[in-house]
Image: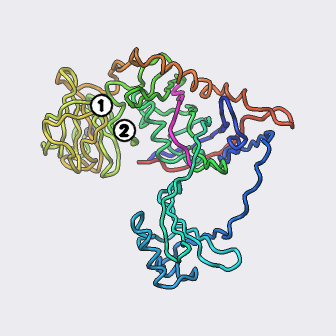
Amino acid sequence: MLRSHFSIFVVAVSICLGACSSSQFADQAEAEEVSLEVAAPQPAPEPPPPPWVEEQVSVQRGSTIARILQDQGLEYSQALAVVDAASGIHDLSRIKIGEQLTFRMGREDRRFYGLLYPLDRYGERRLLVERAEDGSFLATELQLATERVPVLLAARVEGSLWATREKLGLSAANIVGLASVFEWEIDFNTGVREGDSFSMVIESVRDAATGKQIRYGEVLAAEYVNSGTAYRGFRFVDSEERLGYYNEEGLSTKKMFLKSPLKFSRISSGFSKRRYHPVLKRWRAHNGIDYAASRGTPVRAIGGGRVKFTGTKGGYGKHVRVRHNGKYASSYSHLSRIAVRRGQVLSQGQIVGYVGATGLATGPHLHFEFYVHGAYANFRTQKFPRTEPIASSERAAFDAELARLKPLLDGDAAAQLPVPASGVPERTAVLDAKLSAPILR
Ligand SMILES: [Zn+2]
């Protein structure tokens, strides 16, 4: 098990080009300790306050929606009518412990005006059940108006990428998003080195009304400095809605093969001519790579191709072999379950099965083999060409996107932040933190 220690410096800078509104600088990212005072536009007259106030109720153990609604002053029959009205959008009888309900209760009379319930993790979609004039209940789905503001995040890594997640307030999906930009160039299982660093321009998805950050969105551009070599990727969606990441020369970060058949794991035994076999208790060549991972971890085809074999094969246990082209093939062994059929055509990254311990294996791991012209080859020392440069017809659009994103990644756009009355803006917040967190296995 790898222990990961991190010292992180974080730069969270609101970036906007062209028209900037003051709310775009109301960044509440935990890393940011900078508040910029911006000359506020003339405020619009305040609308009159609603006749209700919002109150939060969290679902307790043993609680039911009927009970909660009755606690808010509704009759039992009215509680059922609320659930019934909502049923086309969400089944309120299936609320779970810890979920938050928001009630709109009369300021003076404590009358029930409405109920809000989040329909997704961040409450961007919400159910609203309101009491109509005639006493009936009406349900609607509310979509929060959001804005996406690019922000720059940077961190120095001393261990694995994974543990920076919490410190930066990133979700698992955000870290997977960052890793996926470079997964053809950097093996995040084994390639991460002390002193690596990364920066990324990521969307800060905010409540358009309050400017409050709800979550992070897409990774727009990223740089990862691995063992002193900088890799860069810029997000580009072409005219056919195909998403890809490209370097400044317009070459796709995508390559013929993924760096690893597993997203996050570690190599427990490499390719070698001679190693002591833990089950056979004798020395023999290890013609593949073992990745330690827990049972059920998805195993990905490293490249597109056709499935040549599926089934149980001696010491390999449950085994899948994929032929990528006339030269290259790969295989995946000790699987707990096979997810493909013989003859099936696979795309790169498609799940072929799940990690297990079938065949000659002491515990769950993936035994991965790679073949060049049918002979065992060390996958980690092979050199493969980049594929898919940007199409010439897409070049102008890509160049425009690059011109937008590159200054953001370089931090140049920070120079365009308005200067507060108090003086020169402080653009970076430096925070030193030692983290010790388990990595995803
Ligand atoms: Zn092995």
> What is the number of the mark on residue 250?
none
Badge 1 crowding class, 10 Å Cα cut-off, few under 14, some 14 to 19, many 20 or more, is many
Residue 153 shows up from this direction: no
Q: Is residue 223 left or right of residue 274?
A: right
Residue identified by numbered label 2 = 267
Marks 2,1: beta carbons within 8 A:
no
**Residue at (78% x, 47% y) in the render:** 43
Q: Nearer the viewer, residue 304 or 330?
A: 304
- Is residue 221 a member of the stretch shown in magenta? yes
Amino acid at dot 1: Phe
- What are the residue bounds of the magenta stretch? 215-227
Q: Is residue 162 left or right of residue 295?
A: right
Residue identified by numbered label 1 = 271
Q: Nearer the viewer, residue 355 or 198?
A: 198
**How far is mark 2 from mark 1, CA to CA?**
10 Å
Q: Give the prevailing secondary structure in the magenta stretch.
A: strand
